[in-house]
């Protein structure tokens, strides 16, 4: 599903963001990316989205290789992924339902089905009664649930999340992670970047990949040792 082979990413001003990363995420996995700010977590997510390309090495996502990527491949690939962010990125002048609907509109979904599907997605994330609320009327946890519903709008194979609980209190964070667990249990691959180690410790059954200074320093699946040898 996702495979990084010898991937490095170098920026002209700041140098290496990733250095020789080898990482395989099979279909249906749930993976926590952990590490301090600047460790390389967000860079990996941007590479998986093909928003950026590796400086060295190869990235493969759902059969698409960064080494042979055509510009026309990117929109198709992006439709296979959903993305949730720490700051939610909701449109303030649209209701929760309209925010989810917008993700369907931009991909050309049939207008007659958009509202019905948006309402169904909000129900899936526990917000069936909040569809007509504007973002300013929602709690932080509710905003993130709307953002997740929007990320699921185009039925992606992969859900990427960049510090999705970073602006939430403990109770809301647990609720969001429980939602991710349900999504993963239905077969979707989930890759979640987080610095909240307490959240990670509460779910020891999930794979943890720790980054430091752009390198993988720990992988609970044991792949660091295998690839090094």
Image: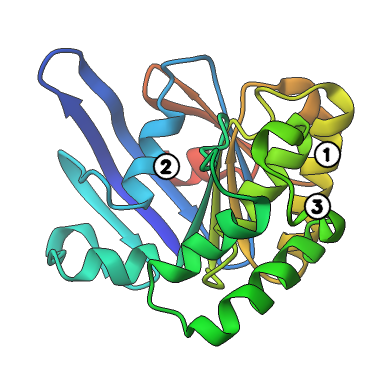
x and y, in percent, of residue 79 in the image: 41, 68
Q: The C terminus is located in which quarter?
A: top left
Q: Is residue 36 left or right of residue 208?
A: left
x and y, in percent, of residue 178 in the image: 84, 47
Q: Which residue is mark 1?
A: 203
How many numbered circles does the render carry?
Answer: 3
Asked if residue 203 is positioned above or below residue 102 in the image, the reply reads above
Q: Earlier in the sequence, mark 1 or mark 2?
A: 2
Front residue of 192/210: it is: 192
- The secondary structure type at the circle numbered 3 is helix
Q: Is residue 69 left or right of residue 119?
A: left
Front residue of 130/196: it is: 130
Residue at 79% x, 52% y: name it.
Answer: 179
Mark 1 residue crowding within 10 angstroms, few (<14) / some (14–19) / many (20+):
few
Q: CA distance from mark 3 to mark 1?
A: 29 Å
Q: CA distance from mark 2 to mark 3?
A: 30 Å
Mark 3 and mark 2 in contact (Cβ < 8 Å)?
A: no
Q: Which residue is mark 3?
A: 130
Q: Is residue 10 left or right of residue 146?
A: left
- The secondary structure type at the circle numbered 2 is helix
Q: Quadrant of residue 216?
A: top left
Residue at 55% x, 65% y: name it.
Answer: 101
Q: Which residue is mark 2?
A: 45
Asked if residue 228 is positioned above or below residue 181 in the image, the reply reads above
């Amino acid at each position: 599903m996702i495979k990084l082979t010898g991937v490095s990413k170098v920026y002209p001003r700041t140098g290496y963001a990733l250095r020789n990363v080898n990482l395989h995420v099979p279909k249906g996995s749930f993976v926590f990316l952990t590490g301090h700010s600047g460790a390389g977590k967000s860079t990996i997510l941007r590479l998986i989205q093909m928003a950026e390309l590796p400086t060295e090495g190869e990235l493969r996502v759902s059969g698409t290789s960064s080494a042979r990527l055509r510009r026309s491949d990117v929109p198709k690939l992006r439709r296979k992924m959903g993305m949730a962010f720490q700051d939610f990125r909701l449109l303030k002048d649209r209701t929760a339902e309209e925010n989810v609907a917008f993700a369907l509109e931009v991909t050309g979904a049939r207008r007659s089905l958009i509202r019905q599907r948006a309402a169904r997605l909000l129900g899936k994330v526990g917000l069936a009664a909040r569809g007509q609320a504007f973002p300013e009327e929602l709690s932080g946890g509710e905003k993130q649930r709307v953002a997740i519903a929007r990320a699921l709008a185009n039925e992606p194979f992969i859900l990427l999340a960049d510090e999705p609980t970073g602006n939430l209190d403990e109770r809301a964070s647990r609720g969001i992670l429980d939602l991710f667990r349900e999504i993963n249990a239905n077969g979707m691959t989930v890759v979640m970047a987080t610095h909240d180690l307490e959240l990670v410790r509460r779910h020891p059954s999930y794979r943890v990949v720790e980054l430091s200074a752009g390198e993988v320093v720990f992988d609970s699946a044991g792949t660091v040792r295998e690839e090094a040898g």
